[in-house]
Structures are given as C-alpha cells and as structure tokens.
Image: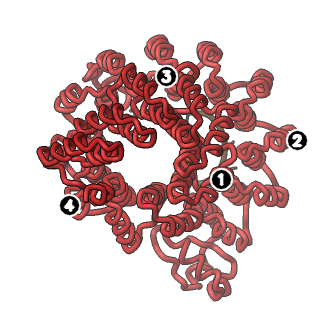
Chain colours: A red, B brown
Amino acid sequence: MAIWCRNISSLRRSAINRQLSHLIAPYVSGQPIRCRSTKISDAPPDIRRVNKNITNLIRNGRVEDARRLFGMLTHRNTVTWNSMISGYVQQREIVKARYLFDKMPQRDVVSWNVMISGYLSCRHLEEGRKLFDEMPSRDFVSWNTMISGYAKAGKMNEALKLFNCMPDKNVVSWNAVISGFLRNGDVKTAVEYFKRMPERDSASLGALVSGLIQNEELDEAENVLYEFGESNDGTEDLIHAYNTLIAGYGQKGRAGDARRLFDKVPSYSSAQGISRKKRFERNVVSWNSMIMAYIKAGDMVSSRELFDQMTERDTFSWNTMVSGYVHASNMDEASNLFSKMRNPDVLSWNSIISGYAQTGKLELARDYFERMPQRNRVSWNSMISGCERNADYKGAIKLFMEMQQAGEKPDRHTLSSLLSVCAETVALFLGMQIHQLVSKTVIPDIPLNNSLITMYARCGAIHEARTIFDNMKFQKDVISWNAMVGGYASHGFAFEALELFELMKCLKVRPTRITFISVLNACAHAGLVEQGRLYFKSMDSEFGIKPEVEHFASLVDIVSRDGQLEEAMKVINTMPVEPDKAVWGAVLGACRVHNNVEFARIAAEALMRLEPESSGPYCLLYNMYADAGRWDDANGIRVLMETNNIRKEPAYSRMGSASS
DNA sequence: GTAGGGTTAG
C-alpha cells in the first residue's frame, strides 16, 4: 500500500495517524488507506511513494501536514529532506527550512539550491550568497538561481558579475539576465544581450516581446519579432509571441497596428505534416486578442465582424464579445449574444448581471441572478454594487444578508460597496459594523481604506476618518487625499481642509478636479476670497486642470458671498461653460443676504428656466420684493406662480406667513 | 508526476 511505516498498527492507533490517513487518502492512488496492518506492514519501503505524498501535500498548501508525515518517517532519503525544505521555502518559512537544512545528514547540490532560492525569494540576498559561496560544488541551477535572485532584486551589477564569471552559461542564464534588464527598464541592453545569445529556446523570444511591451516599447517588440521570429530557433512559439504583441497593441488602443500584425499571420498554414502546435497560423487566442483590441478601441462593429468570421469560438470569445457590449452599454446585443451561447459559464452570467445592474436595470439583473445555475462572489458583488450605484440602498443590504445566508464570504469589493451605502445614507452605526467586518476579513487595500475614510467623513465622524487616513502612511493615493480634504470641507473645517491641501502639494501629490471642488468650497465657507481666487487660478496654471462648471460655481459662490455681486456676474458672463443651477443658486442666495434685488431677479429668472417646476426662486424673489416693500413686484411673482402652476413647497413656509 | 534555475498570448 502507499504509506510505508515500520510499525503501522501502533501508528494507526494514534489520533494523528487517523487524521493523516484521512488527508493523505485522496492523494494515494485515489483510494482510502486500508487499515489492515498485515497488508501494509508487509509492503516494501517505498520512499519514492512517501516522498510523492509529501510533495502532494505541499502542493495543496498543507505543509504542516507534510511535516507531520515527515516527522513520523523512519526512512528518509535526501529527496525527502529536499522536498520538505522546498515545501517550507514555498511558504516563505525560511527559518523552518533552514532548521531542516542544518539538520539533514547529507546534502546534495539540490539541497543547497533549494535553500539558496528560499533566501532569495525572501529577499535575503546576503544569506543566499553566503550559502552560494560556501557550497562544495555548483551546477547550472545554482548559478542561475543566484543570478536571477540578483536580477529580480534589481541588482543587475551583481547579476552580471556572476553571469560573466560563470564557467558555462546555458539558455536559462541568458534568459535570466535579459529578463532582469527588462524588469529594470533597460530595454537597450536587453535587446543587445538577446542578439548575443548563442542559442534561444521557445521562451526567449516570447519573454523578450512581452518585456518590451511592458516597457511600452511596442515598435521595438515588433522589430525583434520580425528579426528573430523567422530564424530556426524559437519559432515554435512564434504565434505565442505574435499574440502577445497583438494583445499589447490592443491594450494600448492601437487596434490598427494589432490588425496589421493579425493579418501577417496566415489563417491556415500550408505546411502539412507538422503538428498543429508547431504551425505558424492563427489560433483562437489570436482571434480573441484581435476582438479585444477592437473592443478596447471602442469599435464594436469591427469586433463583431471578426467574431462572426470565427470558425472556432471558445467561451472566452463569447465572454469577450458579451462583456464588450456590456461595457458599450449595449445591453440588447449583449443579452442577444448571451442567449445564443454554448454553455455560458459563471463569467458570462456575471457580465450580463453586472451590465444590467450598472445600467440601472436592477430587476433584469435580479432576474438573471436568480436564474444562474451557479453563483460566485463576483455575482453577488455585481448585484450589490449595482444596487448601491442606483441608490437602492435597502436592496444592497438585503442582498448582503442573503449572501451571508448563502455562505458566500464578503471580499473587499463587497465591503467597499457596503461602505458606500453607509456613506450615502449617512449610516454611521452600520458603517462601524462594516468596518469591524473589514478588520476581521481582509487586509484593507488603498481603495477600501478610501471607502472607510469617505464613509466616516460623510457621517461626520471626521476624527475616525482622519485616523484611517493617517494610518495609511505612505499608502495613499489621490482619492484618499480627496476624501479627507472633501470631508473637512463639507463639515465646515475649512482650515483643516486647506492645510491638508497644502500638505498634499508639498508631498507632490497631484490634485484633481475633485480636490479643487472641495478646496474652493472650503474657501467659500470660510470667506477666503483672495485665497479662493488664487486657488482657482492655479488649477489651470499649475496643474493644467481646466475649470468646469462646478469650479465656476464655487468661484461665483466665493465672490458673491463676499458681496461682490457685480464681480460674480462678470465671472458668469465670461465663463466658457453654461452656468447651471448651482451657479445661479449661489448668486441668488448671496443676493438675498446682501439685499440686491436686481441681480436676484436675473438669477431667479435663470433658475426658473433651468428648473421650471421649482418654487424656490419664486419664493425667494417674492420675499425680497416683500421685504423691500415692493408689493407690486411681489404680487407679480405670485401671479406668475399661478400662471405657471407653481405650488409652494412646504420648505418655503416662510412665504406663507409673509403673505397672510 | 520525487526535490532545485529562466520564461511566453486572450
């Protein structure tokens, strides 16, 4: 039988063995361990088999189980030790690995190599190098491990030193240094070394092309593809490399270039008798990549054309096309295509659901959601975030409860949506509970921390928001800053908002249009007229942000609150965008405070045009006329209201008392 | 398919 132990019956009695047999069973010839001691104890010691079990446990992430098995063995060979050490290395448990390494009776070159690679993957370069220098003999792997360790850590000088004094380099050594150059952005040297390589294998060209694409060197990638793609070496995976570049062009929105490359690849190879794998011809990935390129460029017509031409589509092709339509907000085509599918998988269903949910068709989304054969976390998240974005806050919470009942655990996306719900509904208590859930279930990343800040800030818990913000230390993005600056600004902490804004500029965090909305708002509330003007000017002059209508509204607000109503009108008359109700609302409010009836009339009339149903401007103007004793004008407004069938809203009860 | 190095497409 599969497990060999010297004294199997005593082992069997022990609890640990019961556990072990349970967990080893699936990996041993698919059969549970039979506890008939005669059969097992008669079995010959098969270390290879035991080693395999250890490896399998490790492969399934059960290193400690492997360790328990390892500890029970009476016969181990070097491979047993090496496997166990490698298990710890994979788990980054370098101390435990080293303990075994020091304890093992005999080491071979693999033991050293495993240990070295363990140190390198934990970024302990010096320790790795120490072992490398100590080891009695080295093979290719030892050298290459060390070289790639240096290359990955960005220490190309050290990598090259080793590479140059390496007695015999193989293709892996070359690949390691070249990918090191590429990772460090040294494209030129990478290509140079690639050209100098004595031999290349199937991965060399593909790795170079992909590395060049990551360095935004798409044209260079195309050059090397032509120069080296045709040579005898490395042509096996030529289509792979072509596809890489087609996809690369696609991601950069260069659908034309992608197509040019796509057209260079024959649809069918004329070479007969060569295995399909080795022929240079379009495969389904080429087609799918090209379709994606068109979708990325927003050309749904061409992508559909290509899709229709395909003779062999896989689920990926269908899903790409469906999600393309979803992103183009063409839900009719998306669902049309979806209804024609081979087997929609969970991704296909999720595309449709999120498409409907994001476009506000929550009932349709729910309908598909109910019908899908299998749901995953993304399905739930799509529904919840759809509800949140369409202001169905109750629906979002209800779905979350259903999700928990269904046994699906929330992830950062779920929690982020829920925090947005709390922020929108100013539900501080629920928000705090979600915060607890965050602490329990995930390590918050930047977006999730931003959601927390926004939630607390919206709920007025500005100190809580600031605590999260400060705890993020250097892990902030501009959204974190915006959330905090905006939180201060909207709760009347103008000074704190501006202080933070200045700090953010000092730290070279580039503000966005959102930042300036908060900053200008803070200035408006704090009455900082000149500072507000300066900030407004700096938007374009310092940061190249063209002011939009919201910013103009703030500027108008700033100057008109200060009583500079003529100045406000000048801004409105010269601004390049159409003034909206926020702009005129600011003017009207200031006119009321500063008692400027003439400008109030202009502002109110503009508002009446923009919002014909609202009684607000009528009421305000009425009150102003009444206060000024201009009863004719006041009555004129009343008549106008009756003519236009405007009913006063309860919020404006002040007018009722004034008129009666 | 017992352990160690580089690396490639949607």
- What is the C-alpha distance between the residues marked 4 and 2? 66 Å
The structure residue drawn at horizontal position 33% and vertical position 38%, both measured from the top left corner, is: A581
Pointer 3 or 4: first along the chain: 3
**Which residue is identified by label 2?**
A134
Q: Amino acid at mark 1?
A: Gln
* In contact (CB < 8 Å): disc 3 and disc 4: no
Residue A265's image quarter? Answer: top left
Q: Amino acid at mark 4?
A: Asp
Query: How many residues crowd around disc 3 within 10 Å: few (fewer than 14), some, or many (20 or more)?
Result: some
Q: Are marks 3 and 2 on the same chain?
A: yes
Q: Nearer the viewer, residue A366 or A579?
A: A579
**Which residue is identified by label 1?**
A90
Q: Nearer the viewer, residue A552 or A420?
A: A552
Q: Amino acid at mark 3?
A: Gly
Q: Are marks 4 and 2 on the same chain?
A: yes
Q: Nearer the viewer, residue A294 or A160?
A: A294
Q: Tell me where residue A6 appears, x and y as whole percent.
A: 69, 78
Q: Tell me where residue A472 appears, x and y as whole percent.
A: 65, 49
The structure residue drawn at horizontal position 51% and vertical position 73%, both measured from the top left corner, is: A25
- What is the C-alpha distance between the residues marked 1 and 4? 44 Å
Quarter of the image with the N terminus of chain A is bottom right
Pointer 3 or 1: first along the chain: 1
